[in-house]
Image (cartoon, grey):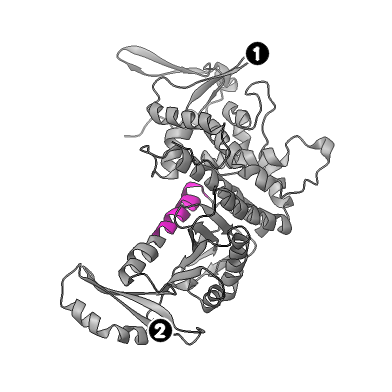
Amino acid sequence: MQLPFANIHTEQPTQQALFPDCFEVSVAPVKGKKVVLDFQGGNTTSDAGVLLLKEVESMTRIVPKLADCIADSRRTSSVMHVIHDLIAQRVYQIACGYEDGNDSNSLRKDPALKMALNRLPESGDDLASQPTFSRLENMVTRPELYRMAVGFLDHFLDSYTEAPRVIVLDFDDTEDVVHGKQQLALFNGYHQETCYQPLHVFEGLTGKLIASILRPGRRPTGKEIVSYVKRIIRHIRSRWPETIIVYRGDSHYGVPEVYSFLASKRNCYSVTGLGGNDVLLRSVKDIIEEVKKHGAGYRRYHTFQYQARSWNGSRRVVAKVEMTEKGLNVRFISTDIQEAKAKTLYEQIYSARGNDELYIKAHKTFMKSDRTSCHRFLANQFRVFLHSAAYVLVHAFQTNLLRGTALATATFETIRLKLLKIGAKVIEMKTRIKVHLPTSYPYKPILNKCLTILEHLRSVPWPSTAIP
């Protein structure tokens, strides 16, 4: 059946359409009562939860740490939006699901976002628009981006009240498909796409972001990987000289350059995937024959020493041989950790690397960090940093405020929909601002807990060990 919509868009706009504030229309009645829609609800927002993010940001201080890295070369008398406010606005918008710079045009008057930037919701100045952000993206220099990268690492270190006993550096990359002619975007044969291939480094035990580096669309070489490892570990060692550091990655990140560097450092270890070859398979030949005699689910582990030609010395190898529904599965990992049992090394230490893929998914899919549509490579790196700051903010929100709740392990998208996307009516009065949340809001207990924790945290330094 064809619906009678064909001629609607050809009609001239009515007086009501020209003045949407006076717009009123009826929809299907409910129980015989007429349902009328209008725009007379007052100053409202659909993102009242951003006020929670503002509270978290005021404690983590990620925005000023990044803003301080950028020199403002604009004429002072013409500046309406300082660098700090511009970064904060974009980070809050990304966290709330507005990942495109163009979204700024329609959010300039949003009362909740204005309050998040310390502006009055009605009488305060409007927020920045898309052209302002385009200019900001293209004014940031390479040295400033480097300082921002160090800022993320410093923020990671600052998030601990004391030096941890162990940290895990999870290295991995992901494809960032592009659809224009961006600088340094390359065709990747594995992904069969023109893309960037950003490198992400997370702390494997907590999911805290350490680094997010935009790269050309090819996997990094050993020389490139070790350059990142050196910078990160040396910076960590300047603050945490005794912390045990475990480097972890798939087989592509098991490179001799990294092995040699870590071997020269105290309390530095590695666990990486290892591609199979004939020599390795011969080392587990008897175990393979044994596993073949059993059904799906049977698994054996075996450990031995092995040295590839490119390695400076032998390393411990752990082999996992198992029978699955699809047949025999043989996997190898390489490590310099000698004390742990083979099964523990594989199942509890290496296999936990899978969490890194979830962190990347949160960064890329939920924070939309693949919105790298600028022509200039440096501008796109700056965008990645903005999305990384949004990740840091939401991650801190989840780990510190949602602990012990039903959302403690929820995805960032679920947190956004249930705690950030809250409709509210905002009333600016002479001496205070009222934010009326919906009476029917279904997550009041969780929201109340968040507000109680925030009230407590205002009285203690960040990071706090006194979180309920």
Q: Nearer the viewer, residue 400 or 22?
A: 400
Residue 106 visible at all: yes
Residue 78: quarter of image: top right
Q: Is residue 144 above or below residue 285?
A: above
Task: Residue at 59%, 75% (x, y): give it.
Answer: 223
The amino acid at mark 2 is: Tyr
Name the residue at 80% across, 47% down: 73
- According to the picture, the residue beneath numbered tag 1 turns out to be 430
Q: Secondary structure at mark 2?
A: strand
Taking 318 as reference, is 84 left or right?
A: right
Q: What residue range appears in magenta?
A: 354-368
Residue 80 sits in quarter? top right
Q: Is residue 194 above or below residue 72?
A: below
Q: Position of residue 48 (x, y in %)?
A: 52, 29
| Labels 2 and 1: the sequence-earlier one | 2
Residue beneath disc 2: 306
Above or below: residue 402 compared with residue 45: below
